[in-house]
Image (cartoon, grey):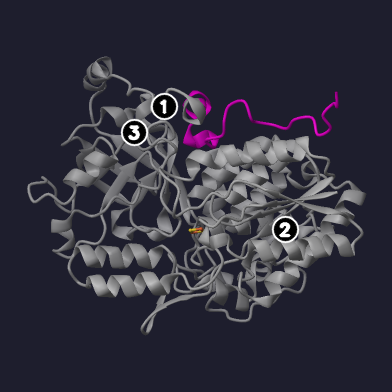
Amino acid sequence: MIGVLNTWSELNPCHTHFRDRAEEVKRGVWQAGGFPVELPAMSLSEPFQKPTTMLYRNMLAMEAEELLRSHPVDGAVLMGGCDKTTPGLVMGATSMGLPFVFLPAGPMLPGRWGAEVLGSGSDAWKYWAQKRAGRITEQDWNEIENGIARSPGHCMTMGTASTMTAAAEALGLTLPGASSVPAAFSGHARMAVATGRRIVDMVWQDLRPAEVLTAAAFRNAVTVVMALGGSTNAVIHLVAMAGRAGVDLPLEAFDEIARRTPVLANIRPSGEYLMADFHDAGGLRALMAQLADLLDLDARTVGGGTLGENIAGAAVHDADIIRPRDRALSPEGALAVLRGSLAPDGCVIKTTAASPELLQHTGRAVVFDDYDNLAARIDADDLDVDETCVLVLRGAGPLGGPGMPEWGQLPIPKKLLQRGVTDMVRISDARMSGTSYGTCVLHVAPESAAGGPLALVRDGDLITLDVPARRLDLLVPDEELAQRRAAWQPPAPPAGRGYGALFAQHVTQANEGCDFDFLAGSGAPEPAIH
Ligand code: FES
């Protein structure tokens, strides 16, 4: 019996093809002699769920785990792709411990506006800023909206969806080459059938996630995320996924791996192209073949072979899209982990999406207490700000958001936008969409709502960002900070009952993966029947 966990929903445009794909998975299961049963699971729809799908990632993880625990199934195919669906499904199925294969939704086809190629998210942010600055019209904006998402599939830039499905493949959880196949390609349907066939064999072989999700597999995934110029969200999700597998994955591992991994994928927002181009250039197998000496090729995968066997013979068909090592987009990986007096437990910055001249910068803080405060003041003519300032948003972390929304790409104040300013140092305890760009320091831990130093920053304080030294510091004397701390009041909990209350009581901080404290590790795969 194979459970097919389907995150289809009418309100998730990234998964519109999942009804068809579920049938194709089932066909594969039948072909191999299994019996498939489709089990609907919560669809975390990035564009439509408020305040953020991140609030519900752990809920999907609990649902996936208990669906597999409580139903009479021997293995599972997990169907996901839109940002949080990949980590949510994998976290839950890992804790349950049954054999599973992950089926990535596949990216959308490229978007288009007139002669312009549009990439999900990245071009929305770009043209939204142009609209605020008065450079494009409402009609232009409507045309962009109509042209940016033209097929089924998840965002086709190297946003969180493409990053996490690639991470799933690098972890060994998909069939070889599965993660970059565009959703609308016929190859995607064939991959779904092959996935259905494979899970039946996997059950007979009793190949369980614990044999695949080793420390080496997680280091492979981090290496691949860095070489892709992947989303900062991968840091949180991979830490949480590793926690389910019993693997310790500290933030420092990301920084260490980033320093030795070049960015080879020329994909927006760090590069130029989109996921369909990446697929045609050879896809993830070809990228991993370029990195072979940085990967543990003996890692097992759900396909039955090792990672090394999966990438053997993979060729690059366009060396501008998947760069050779000597023409890397960046000699180091996409992310840096910083610590300092403003982030004692760490924070991250996507260096490849930042302005090089701002990576070492000291500026005066302009502080926004929460998102509503930011929205009300950011475009005010009397906002005391210039391009050397550091914009600070707090109240946007796991507890504060709640759910750690993607508010970390704070908008440039309108009066600066109109003067042509396109980037500033921005700091928050929020996350940022993987499709975003700018010199944005994210995931500051502990967050302000938990009493982290971010809660104590005031307008006019000096803040120093020093990415080469991996530091983020608040230049305020300790005695002054102690006085501010004594006067600080924690915010009221956002919810008094229900899931929101459960979330607030048990969510961990960003450096720990934002999982619930009681969900780490695995449960008994075979519950007693009474
Ligand atoms: Fe689903 Fe971006 S909206 S992946």
Residue found farthest to the left: 382
Is the CB–ligand 1 distance for label 1 below 8 Å?
A: no
Is the CB–ligand 1 distance for label 3 below 8 Å?
A: no
The C terminus - image quarter: top right
Amino acid carrying mark 1 in the image:
Ala
Query: To which residue does mark 1 refer?
Result: 495
Amino acid carrying mark 3 in the image:
Leu
* Quarter of the rendering containing residue 189: bottom right
Which disc, if any, is residue 342? 3
Q: Is residue 125 above or below residue 50?
A: below
Residue found farthest to the front: 10
Query: So how many labels did they put on this image?
Result: 3
Query: In what element is the residue under mark 2?
Result: loop
Residue 525 in the magenta stretch? The answer is yes
Task: Compare residues 413 and 198 and report the one nearer the observer.
Answer: 198
Residue at 63%, 41% (x, y): give it: 241
Residue 233 appears at what percent x and percent y?
A: 49, 48
Distance from label 2 to label 3 (Cα)? 39 Å
Residue found farthest to the bottom: 115
Residue stretch in magenta: 502-530
Q: Are marks 2 and 3 in contact (CB under 8 Å)?
A: no
Amino acid carrying mark 2 in the image:
Thr
Q: Are marks 3 and 1 in contact (CB under 8 Å)?
A: no
Residue at 60%, 47% (x, y): give it: 87
* Quarter of the rendering containing residue 134: bottom left
Residue 394 appears at what percent x and percent y?
A: 31, 36
Task: Compare residues 86 and 296 and report the one nearer the observer.
Answer: 86
> Is residue 261 visible from the viewing direction of this image?
no
Residue 410 appears at what percent x and percent y?
A: 29, 50
Q: Which circle, 3 or 1, is nearer the viewer? A: 1
* Quarter of the rendering containing residue 210: top right
